[in-house]
Image (cartoon, grey):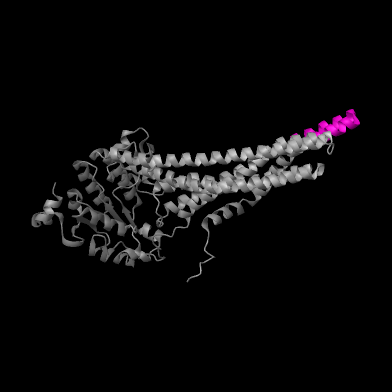
Amino acid sequence: MTTPDTRRPRPASDILRTALRRNRGAMIWGTVLMGLYQAGETAFPIALGLIVEHTMRDRSLGSLGLSIAALAVIITTVSLSWRFGMRILQKANTTEAHRWRVKVAGCGLQPVARDVDLKSGEILTIATEDADQTADIIEVVPLLISSLVAVIVAAVALGLADIRLGLLVIVGTAAIMSVLSVLSKRIGSSTREQQARVARAGAKVADLITGLRPLHGFGGNHAAFRSYRKVSTEAKLQAVTVAKVNGAYAGTALALNAVLAGAVTLTAGWLAFDGQINIGELVMAVGLAQFIMEPLRLFSEMPKYVMIARASAERMALVLTAPPVTTPGSQHPAAGGNLEIDCVRYGTLRDLKLTVAAGEFVAIAAYQPRAAADLAAVLAANVPRDAYEGAVRVGGQELGELSVEAARAHMLVNPYDGEIFAGTLRTNIDPSGTSRTVPEAVEASMLTDVVALHRDGLDYGVRDRGANLSGGQRQRLSLARALAADSEILVLHDPTTAVDAVTEQLIARNVAKLRRGRTTVVITSSPALLDVADRVLVLDDGVVTAEDTHRNLLADDADYCLAVAR
């Protein structure tokens, strides 16, 4: 029998503690000011009771003037403390939510992916809604403490009038919190499930938007919409469940608070009727019974928000604590652009062995699309090192031993479905703003017609995922970005599948000219690109089965001719 590890980290708790720790100053000031606000609110009926008592007893204008001045001080304190207290807390809340959004986004955008079973749409939901709800803990704690201050001040004031009134408030508050703590746990579990289902619906719609064009192409859009409707309906039903639980919680809290306020009022009336408290104390008790409803409401709602913040923190922990898919090394490749694949076995690849010398332009004609995708994934380091056998060497150094920065700087693998971002043509081609070859990359990729078509040229606005561009324009924009990076080794995977034959011919010649003297590997079945390559490697059934120039292979290899001739 093994003993459970009691020291196992609790990521959600750590996230909440981190948020509280780095906002200590703002929370202290916010708590002080909100405590003043609640104390001022509670002091108002106390002051009113004292004013009634002293005015009836002294019946002097001086006492009346002093009482009015005291009320003015209380009202001013209430107004200013609320304004500045909430300003401090909301600024800290917004800042903390921004920090967590950036942190979650940073994890999602790291070059080395994390081993987390979440889609991009789910991570987006976590980086927005969950980050906001987690940061709410910064406001929740000061409001909880300030509400407790109001309850304590009211209990002490009523206890000074009659101990039974003070005990009634204390015991009633404890009973209310005990009942609501049970409901808050239900809210936490329901909220977690709702957030998960909303995230799944977001991921589904993101996938649908990405694949809408091909779905329309083969008539699968209706089935896809039905699938989304099912996921969305599940999210809706869970949201209704959460709303019911929240409604039950709010209704129970309001009813219990009203019962306590009514009990205090009736008890105070009975004590005044019995002559055990005076008229001023009765006015104070009735006023406190009304004013205490608001801090009691806040106090009773805070556990619900704590549970929601914890549920969101647990969702963020799924991303923040997930281990990386692979652990990069720290080495740097030697100068030069040679690429060696030595007996790699992965997916459909079987002991794949090939070498590309520095400065060479090599095309790989893969007869099976799956093999092309597997090869591109291994070269892009999207596959963990322990997931494939053999070795990939860049500049004489094994790819798994290189740091991410060194690998990306030395070798760029441009996928066939490169993402297009919201911005401009220029920011998509040169995101860092440091490339010196943007004009050459635009010309080589034949993106010149897109630039010339719009008055803004390279500053033409591009929508998210390139929604205002055609498929061919998006592909050429992605190719221009790869060429502008001007890396030592460039690997292109089907860069011209969405362009016409004439444009493809021009792109092939331009790319070969621009990349002269730089190592270039093109995984393609395009005759135009195969023809401009120094040599062509035929990848069939996971191994290289033939090697020659495109034209020699066309003349001597019937299978090759059948596979690539159009």
- Vertical placement of residue 22 versus 36, above or below: below
Q: Residue at x 89, y 28 (%)?
A: 61
Q: Position of residue 89 (x, y in %)?
A: 62, 44
Residue 214 placement: quadrant: top left
Q: Main secondary structure of the magenta part?
A: helix
Above or below: residue 550 compared with residue 62: below
Counting labels gives: 0
Q: Is residue 352 left or right of residue 158?
A: left
Residue at (30, 57) in percent of width and height:
377
What x and y, as percent, mark residue 40? Answer: 74, 39
Whether residue 173 sits left or right of residue 497 in the image: it is right
- Note whether residue 136 is visible: no
Residue 50 colored in magenta in the image: yes
x%, y% of residue 139?
A: 61, 45
Locate residue 213, reporting x and y percent: 28, 39
Q: For the point 31% across and 59% down, which residue is it?
A: 379
Q: On the picture, is 550 further left or further right than 71?
A: left
- Whether 434 is drawn above or below 67: the answer is below
Q: Is residue 156 magenta?
A: no
- Could you say which is closer to the camera, residue 533 or residue 525? 525
Q: Nearer the viewer, residue 378 or 313?
A: 313
Magenta residues?
47-75
Which of the 4 image quarters holds residue 406? bottom left
Q: Is residue 550 visible?
A: yes
Along the line of sight, the residue nearer the viewer: 460 or 43: 43
Residue drawn where x is 11% and y is 52% of the image: 561
